[in-house]
Image (cartoon, rainbow, N blue to C red):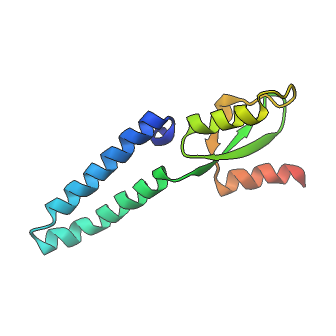
Amino acid sequence: MKQFETKSALRLNVTRLKNQIKALKISGKADPVIKSTLAPIVLEKSSLLEYISSNKTWNFNFQVSGWNSVVAKTREEAIKLAKKEYGKSKNLQVMESSFRVATDADTQALLSLFY
């Protein structure tokens, strides 16, 4: 998701979501019917805000073979952390293009390589 590729994109999207939530709450303030109609949208936006603001596990691959994961809010931060950890290794060169937010399916597929 582009929402958390970089710190600036994350900041922009967090601000946008906060403004949308605020606008929706203001819109429903005067009328209980509108408020109840907008409530699920506010909840969905709030959940999305919580998710994109949180740390995520990022899976990535090494150039030759292998994989690992790091925990960070943005892809940019995840790459920096991985390079810091493995930057001096000759055998473990981080492949920047491989960074992705870990899903259960992806992680299970990677772990199955050990069995």
Query: In which quadrant of the rendered image does the C terminus lie?
Result: bottom right
Above or below for 76 versus 27: above
Outermost right residue: 115
Q: Position of residue 41 (x, y in %)?
A: 30, 62
Classify residue 65 by image quadrant: top right
For the residue pair 29 and 65, the one nearer the viewer reads as 29
Q: Is 45 positioned to the left or the right of 72 in the image? A: left
Q: Is 23 positioned to the left or the right of 31 in the image? A: right
Q: Is 9 positioned to the left or the right of 83 in the image? A: left
Tally the marks: 0
For the residue pair 56 and 63, the one nearer the viewer reads as 56
Above or below for 72 versus 97: below
Outermost left residue: 30
For the residue pair 78 and 2, the one nearer the viewer reads as 78
Q: Position of residue 85 (x, y in %)?
A: 75, 36
What residue do we see at 15% from left, 68% from top?
34
For the residue pair 100 and 51, the one nearer the viewer reads as 51
What residue do we see at 75% from left, 56% from top?
108
What residue do we see at 72% from left, 45% from top?
69
Classify residue 47 by image quadrant: bottom left
Q: Position of residue 72 (x, y in %)?
A: 60, 45
Q: Is 39 positioned to the left or the right of 70 in the image? A: left
What residue do we see at 67% from left, 57% from top?
104
